[in-house]
């Protein structure tokens, strides 16, 4: 029988995708637990339940049920229980639960009002440590009083410089702290209590007596955000001990098996967003200096290969080998996120690549004997599934296929990876997505996609938006110009205090390269991007008429008004001479797309979310009004109640509508 003809991807497939965001392997290496999320199309609500899959093979078993969000599952050290977060009793307030692996009801072990972060078992399995930020007292009281709740907030008293966060809204006066609670329940213990500071990333010592964590204890942490230090405190609370480490941002402490060392992720130096994130090791006793294990390799120890299906990007803490001789960690490199390892002493002459398959390694964990490694992996054609590696044979097997029911019948087109020369003769990596049914003898319209960040990378990861545009007959092409991560520090540093310089030159070199392909109609080229990609789209329409249409999304347009209006607040100045606008007005204006908007002639659609706290909506409004005043064809699409990350995390009907408007604009003009 002839094969069934495959269909093309649609915007509505966003409702059909199921997403795994975390996984954990049992200590005996026999089972893997993971959370699996979906969208209810009628209510637009998002849910997730836990599933367990046997490592030796077999179908995943649904472990929890219900219209709720069960997430972040973690096996107990003896493998008999799973701790997780769930909002099953209160849609707006998750709690910590523990459920037996052998079956039975989940037991609620906390009853707190606030926001939960990471969750970790004590080595003896008797307690759980977690990040928690309490709700402000006045908010709790307002929720209890129906009259006050109906009236809402009367006024907000703002004292912090950082008082809001995209996707979260206005921040409470309360700070993040480290808490513990008995695995069987009981009264939670607040381990850290300094009211003016956030305490994050708790990690148990191997003997269970201490907890390491990160905290910024500067006089005003908001004015010195990179002043993060490593601390150790008794698991019962009390006096905290500072472990001396080099200045710079830090996160994810992890104890060696013998308790003598702590590994962590860190950036060498302050106020340098362009630097690689590295893996450091420091003596836990405080005697001896921290060592940067990855500095000589010029790699970015992170998980920032971006996509538009949420949750898979998970930066895991460094993981120690069972003998304490090696450290495992993720690395962004040339469009992939790999799992690598390195000798604790930094003696290796090269990184050992543990998982280097094309694509992205997300959450991962070893069994107790480190014979098996469970991990999430996604690539250009697979959104993300659970895999397991036998560490002795180094052979991997895929254990889940959660989106095969959708994607096996979809023709995504074909992707060509290329290396080409940038504007300065530099080597650059790019990808060309050709539409389903591609005919090399035809001439196609094309769309340049530009990533946000800027310090992230495009790569071998599923991008629904790209496939959606290709499904409608467009060649979609994207690359990693200077300014992003994954290609070394010099590549990243190239745009510091010169946005619109090397990055623009590289992008236009890429456009020239693609325009010379025989299947490209050079008179029908479009451009789009979001966040920093929106900045570059705004910059492009003010500097060239090469594109016939543009869509600028959640963009930056005016660096002067951006200062202080973003949730990143004043820290943007670190990119622009590290001085405020009143001291560097001409410099900010030189790098602002609005300065050049008077030259714009390209029909441009402006898309922005009304609750975007990263790039305030006034940034998009300035572009829209300027283009209207200039007589350039333009529209503005505004999405109510949505944050900066609409394309990844927004309400699904709005994500679908966004895609339809992008396609409509390009169809009209290309």
Image (cartoon, rainbow, N blue to C red):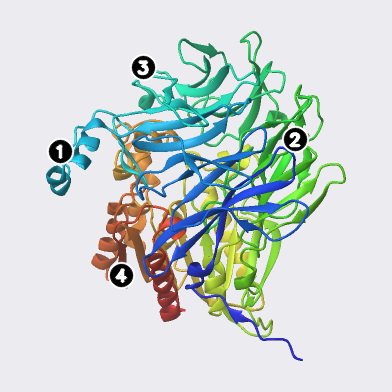
Task: Measuring from the top left, give residue 317's x and y in whole percent.
Answer: 61, 34
| Separation of marks 3 and 2 at Cα, in angstroms | 37 Å
Report the quarter where the N terminus lies: bottom right
Please tell me the numbered disc located at residue 247. Answer: none
* Element type where label 4 sits in the image: strand
| Separation of marks 4 and 3 at Cα, in angstroms | 46 Å
Task: Measuring from the top left, give residue 584's x and y in whole percent.
Answer: 34, 34
* Element type where label 2 sits in the image: strand
Q: Which residue is mark 3?
A: 219
First in sequence: mark 3 or mark 2? 3
Q: Is residue 86 left or right of residue 371?
A: left
Task: Measuring from the top left, give residue 388's x and y in whole percent.
Answer: 74, 50
| Separation of marks 4 and 1 at Cα, in angstroms | 35 Å
* Element type where label 3 sits in the image: loop
How many numbered dots are placed on residues in this image? 4
Q: Is residue 101 above or below residue 13?
A: above
Q: Which residue is mark 1?
A: 155
Q: Residue furthest bottom?
A: 1
Please tell me the numbered disc located at residue 635. Answer: 4
Depth check: give the residue in front, 556 or 220: 220
Please tell me the numbered disc located at residue 341. Answer: 2
First in sequence: mark 1 or mark 3? 1
């Amino acid at each position: 029988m002839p094969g069934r003809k495959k269909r093309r991807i649609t915007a509505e497939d966003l409702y059909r995708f199921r997403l795994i965001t975390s996984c954990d392997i049992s200590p005996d290496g026999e089972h893997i637990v993971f959370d699996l999320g979906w969208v209810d199309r009628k209510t637009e609500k998002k849910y997730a339940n836990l599933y367990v899959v046997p490592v030796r093979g077999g179908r995943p078993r649904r472990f929890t049920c219900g219209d709720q969000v069960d997430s972040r599952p973690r096996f107990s050290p003896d493998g008999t229980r799973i701790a997780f977060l769930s909002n099953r009793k209160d849609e707006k307030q998750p709690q910590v639960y523990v459920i037996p692996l052998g079956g039975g009801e989940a037991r609620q072990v906390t009853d707190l009002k606030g926001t939960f972060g990471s969750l970790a078992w004590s080595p003896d399995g008797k307690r759980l440590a977690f990040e928690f930020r309490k709700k402000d007292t006045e908010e709790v009281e307002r929720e209890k009083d129906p009259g006050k709740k109906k009236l809402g907030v009367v006024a907000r008293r703002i004292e912090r410089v950082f008082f809001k966060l995209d996707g979260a809204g206005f921040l409470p006066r309360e700070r993040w702290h480290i808490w513990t609670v008995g695995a069987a329940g009981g009264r939670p213990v607040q381990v850290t209590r300094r009211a003016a500071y956030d305490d994050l990333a708790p990690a148990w010592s191997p003997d269970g007596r201490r907890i390491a964590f990160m905290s910024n204890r500067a006089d005003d942490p908001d004015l010195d955000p990179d002043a993060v230090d490593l601390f150790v405190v008794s698991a019962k609370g009390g006096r905290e001990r500072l472990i001396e480490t080099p200045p710079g941002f830090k996160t994810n402490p992890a104890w060696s098996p013998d308790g003598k060392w702590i590994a962590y992720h860190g950036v060498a130096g302050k106020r340098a967003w362009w630097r690689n994130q590295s893996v450091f090791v420091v003596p836990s006793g405080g005697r001896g200096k921290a060592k940067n294990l990855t500095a000589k390799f010029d790699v970015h120890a992170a998980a920032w290969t971006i996509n538009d299906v949420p949750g898979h990007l998970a930066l895991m803490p460094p993981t120690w080998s069972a003998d304490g001789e090696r450290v495992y960690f993720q690395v962004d490199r040339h469009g992939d996120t790999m799992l690598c390892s390195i000798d604790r002493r930094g003696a290796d002459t090269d990184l050992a690549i543990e998982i280097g398959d094309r694509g992205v390694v997300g959450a991962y964990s070893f069994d107790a004997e480190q014979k098996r490694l469970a991990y999430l992996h996604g690539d250009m054609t697979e959104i993300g599934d659970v895999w397991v590696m036998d560490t002795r044979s180094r052979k991997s097997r895929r254990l889940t296929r959660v989106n095969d029911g959708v994607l096996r019948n979809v023709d995504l087109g074909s992707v060509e990876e290329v290396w080409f020369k940038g504007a300065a003769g530099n080597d650059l990596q790019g990808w060309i997505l050709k539409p389903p049914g591609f005919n090399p003898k035809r001439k196609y319209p094309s769309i340049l996609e530009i990533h946000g960040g800027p310090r992230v990378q495009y790569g071998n990861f599923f991008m629904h938006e790209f496939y959606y545009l290709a499904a409608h007959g467009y060649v979609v092409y994207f690359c990693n110009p200077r300014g992003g991560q994954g290609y070394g520090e010099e590549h990243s540093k190239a745009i510091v205090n010169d946005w619109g310089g090397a990055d623009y030159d590289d992008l236009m070199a890429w456009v020239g390269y693609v325009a010379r392909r025989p299947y490209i109609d050079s008179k029908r080229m479009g451009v789009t991007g979001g966040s920093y990609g929106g900045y570059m789209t705004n910059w492009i329409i003010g500097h060239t008429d090469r594109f016939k249409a543009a869509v600028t999304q959640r963009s930056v347009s005016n660096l002067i008004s951006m200062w202080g209006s973003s949730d990143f607040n004043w820290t943007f100045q670190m990119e622009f001479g590290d001085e405020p606008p009143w001291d560097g007005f001409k410099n900010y204006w030189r790098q602002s797309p609005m300065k050049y908007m008077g030259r714009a002639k390209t029909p441009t659609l402006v898309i922005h979310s009304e609750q975007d706290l990263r790039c305030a909506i006034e940034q998009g409004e300035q572009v829209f009004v300027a283009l209207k005043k200039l007589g350039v064809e333009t529209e503005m699409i505004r999405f109510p109640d949505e944050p900066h990350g609409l394309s990844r995390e927004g309400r699904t009907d709005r994500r679908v509508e966004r895609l339809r408007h992008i396609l409509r604009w390009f169809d009209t003009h290309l």
